[in-house]
Structures are given as C-alpha cells and as structure tokens.
Image (cartoon, grey):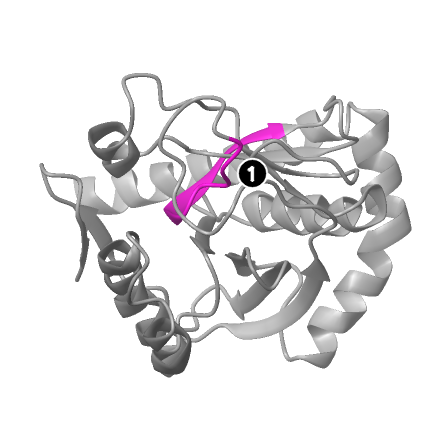
Amino acid sequence: MKFIFLTILNLFSLMTFSQNFKENQFKYERVKEAFYLKWPELAENLKSQGINSDEFNIFIRVFKEEKILEIWVKNKNAKEFKLFKSYPITYSSGIPGPKRKEGDLQVPEGFYFIDRFNPLSNFHLSLGINYPNTSDKVLGDIKPGGDIFIHGSNVSIGCVPISDDKIKEVYTMAVMARNTGQKNIPVHIFPFELTEAKLETKKTNPNYSFWKSLQIAYLYFNKTKTPPLVSMSKSGEYKIN
C-alpha cells in the first residue's frame, strides 16, 4: 500500500512539474511566439513518424566538422529513436578537438545534457549544456570555461548557433519534451562523424585516442538507435556501459 501511495505521489509530482514548466516558459513572449509559429507543423511531423506529440523524448547530436545538429525522437516508452530533423550550424569557432580552457574558442566534445532553458538569451533563445562535465573538469585547465549553449543567430565563441528561425523549433521541441516528462535531454557532441574511415585519416592528431573513446558511443547509437549509458572515471575517461 505504501509503495502504491509513493508511486502515485511521484507521478503527481512529475505531472505538476511538467505543467508548471510549460506554464513558466509561456510567460516569455519569445517562447509563446516560437510555440505558435512552430509547434503545429512540428506536431504534424511527429504524428507522420508515428510519434505521440503528447508524450515523447528527444536526443540531440552535434557534428562540428559537418556543421550539423540532429534532433532524434521516440515515443516515451519506446527503445529506439528516429531521426526527426537535421539543422545546419550557422557558424563554428575553433577546430576539431575538445574544449579544455576558458577562452580557447573550442566547442566542447563529449556527452552532455540540457541543463538550462534561457528564454531571454542575447541570441534569441538558447539551451544550455552542462559543460564542463566531470571529464572536462579533470582533463581541462583549472579554468575550463562555461556557458555553452545551443542558440540562435550566426555567431559563436564555443557555442552551437543554428539561426533564430531554427532555434525556435529546437527550443519548442525541448520545452514540449520536458513538459511531457523528459527530465534529461542528452546532447552528444562529436568532432565529426566517427566512422572508421574518417578516424583512419586522423591517426596523427593528438586527439586521436580521445576520439576513439567517443567512437564507442557513436557506433553504439548508430547500431541500436539508443544512447548508451556513459560514466566517467576518476582520470576523466569516458566509460561506455
């Protein structure tokens, strides 16, 4: 009986959190505008792919060299994601390789999640990622930097800009996924598509070993369409479970 009560309480708390999240976001004019402009077509596109727009999850992948941001979707209780849309990255700073210090202009590489929704961004709307994560803090400089976002506009000093128009779509998708119960929106950022052929050309790069560690997750997702569980060792290495 106690277990049933706690389960009901947890479900109620999750529903309240979701409803309050959307309502709070709708207090901001940019979010409301994005929703009314973009959500009807997005909802129809989800439906055409067999996705319930009232209960879905998203997953974000970024490829720096190809300048592509992908949105993957799935029904909440499904295992496999489907590619929903790809968006061109409008500008990139730095070179292939992880971000290791404040001011290096690098876009991070690794495994992250959305930790902030910013409806008052200087770049229209923005979604913050949890850089620096544990690995970045271990392997990076004493000041690894921070405030890395997926945002609008076409400028960047380490972020991922996709234009004001496209961030309206991505931000709306993230709000609705969070609103339907997805607490953790994963974001995987890769230097490029980590195929064997591509990596073969990078063997002399000092980041080769690091990229090989990222490749495990890249290949796993390509095969299973499910993001792997990622942990980090005390030495900062990614461990793919």
User: Dividing the picture into quarters, in which one does residue 175 lie?
Assistant: top right
User: Which residue is at 55% across, 44% downward?
Assistant: 178
Residue nearest the observer in this picture, 155 or 175: 155
Q: Quadrant of the N terminus?
A: top left
Position of 192 compared to 142: left or right?
right
Q: Is residue 106 magenta?
A: yes
- Is residue 1 visible in the rendered image? The answer is no
- The residue pinned by badge 1 equals 18
Extent of the magenta region: 105-117
Residue 239 picture location, percent across and down: 17, 55
Position of 199 relative to 178 (above/below)? below
User: Which residue is at 18% across, 40% downward?
Assistant: 2
Position of 47 relative to 90 (above/below)? below
User: Dividing the picture into quarters, in which one does residue 223 lie?
Assistant: bottom left
Position of 210 compared to 174: left or right?
left
Position of 59 compared to 216: left or right?
right
Residue 28 picture location, percent across and down: 79, 24
Residue nearest the observer in this picture, 118 or 17: 118
